[in-house]
């Protein structure tokens, strides 16, 4: 038996060798190990330069392009799973030798550590963690990744020099301060890092992290100072982080002259946020022989500073260097009133984006007011809501919304939006292309109202503005009600539909036309892949032209006009209120 077993094993071994020889030598002269693509010609992939390879790899992992100075919760890039994209990009480094360097440069330029997978893989991994937790505590995946990253950058200085941004989940940066301090101490070119909340308030638990960041990371570009960090804010005069470009100051009790001194010491500052500082007045913008001037900025945000008025901002904008540099301005709960807003807009001659958030308690004054006029303003967020003075802090949200929705309160903001409408129809904002308002009926005023006379109060328009009457350029209007969460898109065109588009109508008199987003809730016959056109008829209704590809649609209904009044039947004359359904939020975790 043993001898026969020996012969059988030798025969199988010979067969195996013959099969292997046939595989390597090929069948009928053809080598199966040789790929037809390798025999076709030169390898053009190996000739691609690194910049082209990087551009290709960014499509594999889009979040490596994230250069914003926002937290990980507010800086999502792409709609895929970021952890899976990161894994795929890491696998690309193992494909070819010349791919290793460009892939590593992308992997370590903008590092992002996420807590979960945003795909079906998270359910599988969660089940594995539950099984491991039966034998002990489940490992904290983000904390483990941060610890491994710290080891990698300490072992390889070249990789450490590539890191410009490090973003972490909220709980990781709050509970792993020691590992975070050890990691950032090895990153000499770091420009932004997600920090725990205690770092901005001078918490002693962040003392080591702050010392490492000040000593080892001189290239930090964004920093925030909150209540309790007054001394830390003045420590900027010692030369820490001279390359700061974005600074947020909130609830500090520093003297205004100290604030001016610190801000003037930062040579590259171009974005500043001042919030919840009632001690600030217009004097912070005044010129003084003993202090440097308030620095020229590209973006200025002022929130809850009631003693900063339009006079102080116009004084600041009187400097020619400030006029040319300021492009973004945001005002919320300040002393700048809407009747005075035109002074600020006209003084900021290079302003591109303006955001105004105010609660108003009275209507616009009856005295003549010049319109808001600007040659450069392209985006305006005009978010006005009525102030509820009757409700107490104990009032519920439901009762507050009920009061805000009452006709008495709604009429308070009508005069302000009428003022905005007259500024648009008088062609005082010729460069405006995007408009955000907290009034769902605002597009009606542009569609249905006849062109108004410029500056009804009788004052002359600024030189060069106010010539043509009516809306003379396309305008994208985003509206949102007091109890809504999503913006609704409306496209206003003053010249009618583009030539050749389905459902085009000739409009006499240049009446504006609005194209509403299909997701606004106009019904399935409008389709989901295009924007539908809604034309105002001058009587409070609109002509709806549904799509012909809708299953189950009644034959001959496309383009038909029925006198349905205000019943709001789909595919007929539809009033505005029939299309105010809210859209679902895209901010869900599982997408």
Image (spheres, helix red, strand yellow):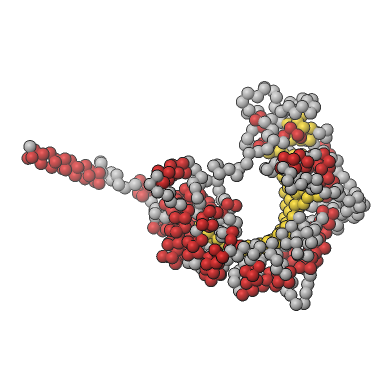
Foreground residue, 178 or 145? 178
**Where, by quadrant of the figure, is residue 373 drawn?**
bottom right
**Where, by quadrant of the figure, is residue 326 drawn?**
bottom right
Q: Is residue 284 above or below residue 341?
A: below
Give x and y (percent) for residue 11. 14, 40
Query: Can the viewer see residue 268?
Result: no
Q: Is residue 587 above or below residue 44?
A: above
Indicate the quadrant containing the C terminus: top left, top right, bottom left or bottom right.
Answer: top right
Question: How many numbered markers are drawn?
Answer: 0
Left/right placement of residue 87 relative to residue 18 reads right
Residue under the point 30% across and 47% down? 33
Residue under the point 70% across and 71% down? 258
Give x and y (percent) for residue 163. 50, 62
Query: Can the viewer see residue 3?
Result: yes
Foreground residue, 250 or 468? 250
Foreground residue, 259 or 350? 259
Left/right placement of residue 449 relative to residue 175 reads right
Q: Is residue 520 above or below residue 434?
A: above
Give x and y (percent) for residue 296. 72, 67
In this view, the residue farthest toward the front is 394
Indicate the quadrant containing the N terminus: top left, top right, bottom left or bottom right.
Answer: top left
In this view, the residue farthest toward the top is 555
Residue under the point 86% across and 48% down? 363
In this view, the residue farthest toward the bottom is 290
Q: Is residue 578 above or below residue 315?
A: above
Left/right placement of residue 374 relative to residue 10 reads right
Residue under the point 43% across and 53% down? 90
């Amino acid at each position: 038996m043993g001898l026969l077993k020996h012969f059988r094993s030798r025969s199988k071994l010979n067969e195996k060798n013959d099969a292997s020889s046939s595989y390597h030598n090929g069948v009928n002269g053809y080598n199966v190990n040789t790929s037809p693509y390798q025999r076709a010609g030169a390898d053009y992939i190996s000739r691609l330069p690194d910049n082209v390879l990087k551009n290709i790899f960014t499509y594999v992992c889009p979040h490596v392009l994230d250069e914003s100075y926002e937290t990980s919760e507010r800086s999502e890039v792409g709609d895929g799973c970021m952890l899976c994209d990161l894994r795929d990009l890491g696998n690309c480094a193992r494909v070819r030798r010349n791919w290793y360097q460009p892939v590593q440069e992308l992997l370590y330029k903008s590092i992002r550590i996420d807590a979960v997978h945003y795909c079906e893989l998270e359910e599988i991994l969660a089940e594995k963690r539950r099984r491991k937790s039966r034998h002990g505590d489940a490992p904290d995946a983000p904390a483990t990744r941060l610890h491994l990253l710290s080891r990698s950058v300490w072992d390889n200085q070249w990789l450490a020099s590539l890191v410009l941004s490090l973003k972490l989940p909220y709980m990781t940066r709050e509970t792993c301060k020691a590992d975070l301090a050890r990691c950032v101490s090895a990153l000499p070119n770091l420009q932004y890092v997600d920090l725990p909340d205690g770092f901005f308030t001078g918490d002693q638990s962040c003392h080591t992290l702050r010392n490492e960041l000040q000593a080892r990371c001189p290239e930090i570009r964004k920093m925030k100072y909150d209540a309790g960090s007054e001394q830390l804010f003045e420590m900027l005069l010692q030369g820490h982080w001279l390359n700061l470009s974005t600074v947020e100051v909130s609830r500090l009790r520093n003297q205004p002259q100290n604030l001016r001194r610190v801000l003037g010491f930062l040579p590259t500052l171009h974005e500043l946020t001042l919030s919840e500082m009632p001690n600030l007045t217009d004097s912070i913008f005044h010129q003084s022989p003993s202090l440097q001037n308030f620095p020229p900025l590209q973006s200025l945000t002022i929130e809850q500073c009631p003693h900063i008025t339009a006079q102080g901002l116009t004084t600041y904008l009187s400097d020619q260097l400030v006029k040319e540099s300021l492009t973004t301005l945001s005002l919320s709960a300040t002393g700048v009133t809407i009747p005075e807003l035109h002074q600020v807009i006209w003084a900021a001659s290079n302003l591109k984006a303006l955001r105004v958030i105010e609660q108003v308690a009275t209507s616009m004054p009856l005295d003549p007011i010049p319109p808001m006029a600007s040659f450069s303003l392209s985006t305006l967020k005009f978010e006005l809501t009525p102030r509820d003075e009757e409700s107490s802090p104990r009032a519920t949200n439901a009762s507050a919304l009920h009061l805000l929705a009452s006709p008495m309160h709604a009429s308070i903001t009508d005069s302000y939006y009428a003022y905005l409408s007259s500024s648009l129809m008088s062609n005082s904002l010729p460069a405006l292309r995007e408009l955000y308002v907290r009034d769902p009926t605002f597009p009606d005023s542009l569609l249905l109202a006849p062109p108004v006379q410029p500056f009804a109060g009788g004052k002359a328009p600024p030189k060069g503005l106010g010539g043509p009457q009516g809306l003379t350029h396309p305008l994208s209007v985003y509206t949102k009600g007091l109890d809504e969460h999503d913006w609704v898109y409306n496209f206003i065109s003053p010249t009618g539909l583009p030539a050749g588009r389905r459902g085009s109508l000739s409009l006499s008199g240049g009446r504006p036309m609005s194209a509403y987003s299909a997701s606004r809730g106009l019904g399935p016959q409008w389709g989901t892949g295009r924007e539908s056109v809604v034309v105002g008829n001058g009587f409070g209704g609109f002509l709806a032209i549904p799509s012909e590809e809708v299953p189950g649609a009644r034959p001959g209904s496309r383009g038909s006009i029925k006198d349905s009044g205000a019943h709001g039947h789909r595919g007929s004359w539809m009033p505005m209120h029939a299309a105010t359904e809210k859209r679902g939020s895209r901010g869900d975790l599982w997408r």
